[in-house]
Image (spheres, rainbow, N blue to C red):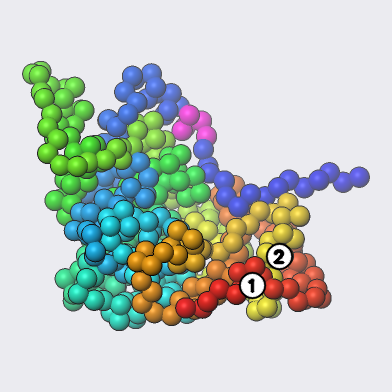
Amino acid sequence: MSSPQSTIPVAKPVLGEEEAEAVRRVILSGWVTQGPEVAAFESEFAAFVGAPHACAMSNCTTALHLALKAAGVGAGDEVITVSHSFIATANAVRYCDAVPVFVDIEADGYNIDPSLIETAITPRTKAILCVHQLGMPCDLRPIVEIGKRHSMPVIEDAACATGSEILWEGRWEKIGKPHGDIACFSFHPRKVVTTGDGGMLTTANSEYDRKFRLWRQHGMSVTDAVRHGSKQVIFEDYDELGYNYRMTDLQAAVGRVQLRRLPELIAQRRLLAGQYCERLSAIAGLTPPIEPDWARSNWQSFCVRLPDAVDQRAVMQALLDKGISTRRGVMNIHLERAYSNQGSHRVATSLKRSVIAQQQTVILPLYAQMTELDIVRIVESIRGSLAEEATAPAAVQSDTNVALV
């Protein structure tokens, strides 16, 4: 009897002895919350992406919140973004008592369609919040131009895009180097760089950076590092509302090791993505992701579009039965119950592409420790699952009856 095959997860962080030793060092130092490791991680991250300022946060959602707040987004304002994103993108807008305004994604990918942005602008529009979905850079140039034309800040939800690059004025530059006004990153375990959880803000605006640092620590006028290092007694002040959005030194120590690993991790992920694309191209009707010639993805996720009329859930279940974990393609926020109330959002364009993408796409396993044999197993399992679907009776997916707004 052959031994059962191991399960292939959809993602797996690369964490080892170096990260463990970094955490041990911090624990033994006695300073485990926001301190010298956070400061070092910020400096190293800023240098890596080419940004004048980097401010560490507890996660990307809090980073998005403070980015919008610094940009002046407040009660009754509107922020143009996509519904086709993780719910945190729009939630951060609502934290500011503002309204997310949804436009559709591009025809050949999963990022915002820049040509739809200006049609959504009203006198209440305060900012544009674009998303580098799944690690694939969005088309920033026209978005930044729209922002400048309307004197409107551009905030990048770069949660998935640490290490991704864009061709800018003839040079390859990292996402996070200030192209827009603020970029927000995530270090969740499904991301290429992880600190367990955590986030980062990058900007060229020193006043934004000052506000981030003030607000992330309850609005405290004096940091812990300054107070503890002072030879005189210092009493701090709290002149405005702040938050507890700090990163710990334990997380930052892990992040510093992860950042050193990042070039190698991305190189391996790009190799695996290339193997996927080559092997999947032989499956009729299946569409691999498209990387524009002006973008270099970190391949945080590998999302494929299934052939028309294929039951997404059935294919995912067939793969799971074979020990292969997958995830449904990116969600649509406007279809969630939390956004069913009038006034929770505004739909500015048809969202047909967004809805169809959610129904027809599947995220396949991709992580640096995968082998070519894993890729072969996954591709052959997909081939078999699609062949079974082709001969199965037609089934209606549970979410195909949603309105293609």
Mark-to-mark CA distance, 2 and 1: 9 Å
Is residue 41 at least partly visible in the picture?
Answer: no
Looking at the image, which residue sits at the far left?
A: 232
Sequence-earlier tag: 2 or 1: 1
Q: Position of residue 377 (x, y in %)?
A: 73, 58
* Residue at (17, 55) in percent of width and height: 205
Residue highlighted by disc 1: 306
Residue highlighted by disc 2: 315
326 on left or right of 357: right
Circle 1 residues within 10 Å: few <14, some 14–19, many ≥20: many
Q: Secondary structure at mark 1?
A: loop
Q: Position of residue 342 (x, y in %)?
A: 38, 67
* Residue at (34, 81) in percent of width and height: 115
> Which part of the image, by quadrant, shows the N terminus?
top right
* Snapshot quadrant of residue 172: bottom left
**Kind of residue sitting beneath label 2:** Val
* Snapshot quadrant of residue 123: bottom left
Residue 256 on the magenta span: no
Circle 2 residues within 10 Å: few <14, some 14–19, many ≥20: many
Which residues fall within the magenta stretch?
16-20
* Residue at (33, 19) in percent of width and height: 30
The prevailing secondary structure element of the residues shown in magenta is: helix
285 on left or right of 197: right
Looking at the image, which residue sits at the far right?
A: 1
* Snapshot quadrant of residue 257: top left
Residue 18 on the magenta span: yes
The answer to whether the residue labelled 2 contacts the one labelled 1, judged by CB atoms less than 8 Å apart, is yes
54 on left or right of 345: left
**Kind of residue sitting beneath label 1:** Leu
Q: Secondary structure at mark 2?
A: helix
* Label disc, if present, on residue 123 of the rendered structure: none
Is residue 354 at least partly visible in the picture?
Answer: yes
